[in-house]
Image (cartoon, rainbow, N blue to C red):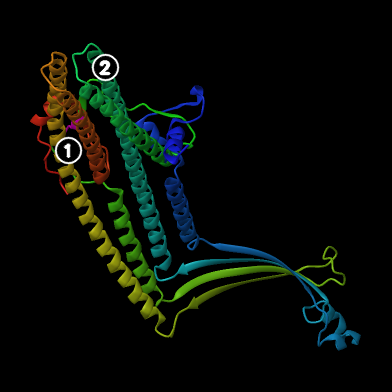
Amino acid sequence: MNLLSMLVVLAQGPAPAGDTLRLSLDGAVRRALESGEEMRLARAQVRDANGQVREAVAAALPQVTGSLVYTRQFASIFEGASGDTTLGPIFENSPFGAANAWTVEIKATQLLFSGGKVGAGLSAARSFRRGVAAQEEETAADVAFRVKRAYLEAAYAGRLRDIAEANLRQAREHLVQVQRYQQVGTRAEYDLLRAQVDAANQEPAVVAAQNGYAIAVLELKRLANVPADQAVVLETALESADGSIPVVAEDSLGAPARPALVAAEAAVAVREQAVRVSRADRLPTLSVGTTLSHQAFPQEMTPFDAQFRRNWNAEVRLSFPMFLGLRTVGAMERARAALELARAQRDQVREQVALDVAQARAELARTQSLLAARRGTVRQARRAQHLASVRYANGMATQLEVTDARLLAQQAEVNEVQATRDYLLALAQLERALGRPVPVVRRPREQVAQLDPSKDIQP
C-alpha cells in the first residue's frame, strides 16, 4: 500500500460505523475553540494576567509576615561571666550568653505613599489583562477562520471527488454503449478504442481526487482536534439543497470590531503607566510598620517550659533616592521609547485592519460575480453534453465530440464548485476582518448577478 492509499484509509477511518463522527461546520469550530492548543495557550495567558493584577493589588495592601526562629549558640564571649553570681544569671537569660534562643515574630507594614507607583502598576496590570483578554478573542477568531477554511477545503475536495467519480461512471457507461454499437457493426473499432482509453484516463483523476479529499480531511481533523483514525462525515454541504447562497443583508456593516484593536489600545495604556512608574522612582516613599516578638532562652533545646518575653515596636520610614547613577533617567527614557513604539504599533494595527476589510470586501465582490457566471456555464455545458450524446446515438456526431462535451461539462462543474468555495471563504474572511459575524440572508443563485456587493464599510 502506497502513501496516498494510506491517506485515503486514514481519512475514511477504520472505526466501525457506530463510531463515525458526524461533523458540522459549527461543530468543528466549537471543538477547536474548546480544546485547541492555540486556545489553551490564550487562556493560560489570561490566567497569568489575572495573577499580575492580584500582585499589583497586593502592593497597596498591608503586608503581614510571621516567623519562628531557633538559635543554638556554641561559643560566646560572655561564657566567662557565667561564674559571676551577679551577672551570670542575667547573661544566661539573654541573647548574649544563652545557649538556646527561640524567637516568635509577627511583622506588619503598610505603604502610605510611593509617588503613584502602586496606582500606576495596578492600572498597567488591568490594562494588560484587558489586552490579553482581547488577544484571546483575536486568537479565537483566527482559529475559527482557519477551521472554516479547512472545512470548506475538505467539502470542496469531497465535491471534486464526487465529480471525478461521476465522470468515470459516465465514461464507463459510454464505453458499454460503444461496445454494443460496435458489436452490431454501427461503430468502428476506432470509436471503441477511444472510449476504452477515455474511460481508463479517468481513473487516475479519481484516485487524485480521493487522495486530495483524504489530505483535506486530515487537515480538518488536526485543527478540530479529531483523532486521525476517527471516521468523519461532513454534515455541512458546500452547496445547499435549495440552490441558495448567503449574501450580505445590510448596506453598511459599520466600523470593524476587531479584538486586535482593543489589544493595541491596551498595550498603549500599559506603556503609559510604565512611564508613570519610572517617573515615580524619583519620589520618596513613606511606610509604617510594627513588629511584635516573643523571645525565650531555655536551658534545654525545647521551648515548652521556657518563659517568653514580649517585645513590641513601631516605625515610620521615609526613604528617598539621592543618587542612583542616572539609572532613573535611563529607565524613563526606555519607558518613553516603549510608549512611542506601542503607539506606532497601534497605528499599524488600525491601518492593517482597514486594509483587511477593504481586501475582504473586494474579494467577496469578485467571487460573488464569478459565482453567478459559473452557474450559467454549468447549465450550458450540461445541455451541450446531452445534445452530443443524442447526436452520437443517432450517428450525427463523433466519439471525440462526446468526449469533449463530457470533459467540458466536468470542468464547468469543477469551476462552479470552486467558485462556491471561494465565495464562502471570502464571506468568512470578511467576518474575520470585521471581527464579528456578518448579517446574511439566503437567496437563489440566479439573483446573485443582480446584487451589488461593493458597498462601503466604515473603517
Residue placed under numbered mark 2 in the picture? 179
Q: Main secondary structure of the magenta part?
A: strand
- For label 2, the SS is helix
Q: Amino acid at mark 2?
A: Gln
The mark lying in front, picked from 2 and 1, is 2
Q: Which quarter of the figure has residue 395?
A: top left
> Where residue 185 sits in the image (x, y, percent)?
21, 13
- For label 1, the SS is helix
Q: Amino acid at mark 1?
A: Thr
Is 93 above or below relative to 261?
A: below
> Where residue 258 sits in the image (x, y, percent)?
27, 48
Report the residue at 11% width, 40% height from top: 455
Question: 176 or 277, which is in the foreground?
Answer: 176
> Where residue 422 sits in the image (x, y, percent)?
23, 38
Is 382 above or below relative to 13?
A: above
Whether residue 85 is visible? no
Judged left or right of residue 228, residue 440 is: left
Question: 220 or 451, which is in the foreground?
Answer: 220
Residue placed under numbered mark 1 in the picture? 367
